[in-house]
Image: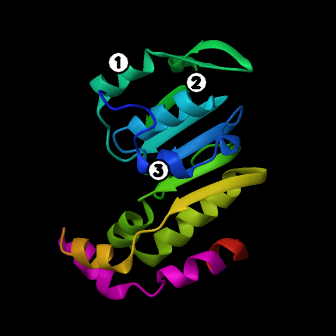
Amino acid sequence: ISHDIDEGPRLKVVKKEWFEGKDCLDIGCNSRIMTIHIAKKFSCRSILGVDIIQGLKEESVSISNGVTKSDNQETKNLSQIVSFQKENFVQTQKFDDNRYDTILCLSVTKWVHLNWGDDSLITLFSEIWRLFNPDGIFVMELQPWKSYENNRCVSETTAMNYRNIVLRLEYFQKILLDK
């Protein structure tokens, strides 16, 4: 990757204390680049990136062969900190029994909603809640309704699910707090 680690707008809004020395889960890690940058910049104890798509394996392997160093941590190879798993998080019966201090869900809720509907969104939130350590941090990036509209015709399934969505963005906080 030729980008400076500090370039991405998401890295500018997340806080070091959310990740430093913590076990983290990145749901929908996509190309894996953000997951690796978080591990590198914020010195996670561990971070697992999960995505339904394999990701950019060659690019992320070369990045993860790099080294990270922080003030309070000796030099560590990123391959000891970062791991990836190809998994459909919302359709897996039970993801794992690990607990996480920080869980990321960036640009994911729209795709879960469009591909599998309201029930899968509730499944996603319930599973996230189950995987939290006490006092865990959940970082979710919501997509505006306009983004749903723009992507509703990706497939017949997404078009149908779009028409049937009842749980709009304004309900997400209530759903999460009720879990």
Q: Earlier in the sequence, mark 2 or mark 3?
A: 3
Which contiguous range is marked in magenta? 155-174
Vertical arrangement, residue 60 with respect to residue 171, above or below: above
Give the image quarter of residue 59: top left
Q: Is residue 71 left or right of residue 1?
A: right
Vertical arrangement, residue 10 with respect to residue 170, above or below: above
Q: Is residue 119 left or right of residue 97?
A: left
In the rendered image, the residue lying farthest to the right is: 134
Give the residue type that dot 2 points to: Ile
Give the residue type that dot 3 points to: Arg
Q: Which mark is residue 10?
A: 3
Q: How far apart are the two marked residues, 3 and 1, measured between alpha carbons? A: 22 Å
The foreground one among 4 and 27 is 4
Q: Secondary structure at mark 1?
A: helix
Q: Earlier in the sequence, mark 3 or mark 1?
A: 3
Q: Which residue is mark 1?
A: 62
Identify which residue is drawn at 47% across, 31% down: 36
| Residue 27 visible in the displayed image | no
Q: Which residue is mark 2?
A: 81
The foreground one among 86 and 10 is 10
Q: Is residue 31 magenta?
A: no
Percent position of residue 146, x then y: 31, 79
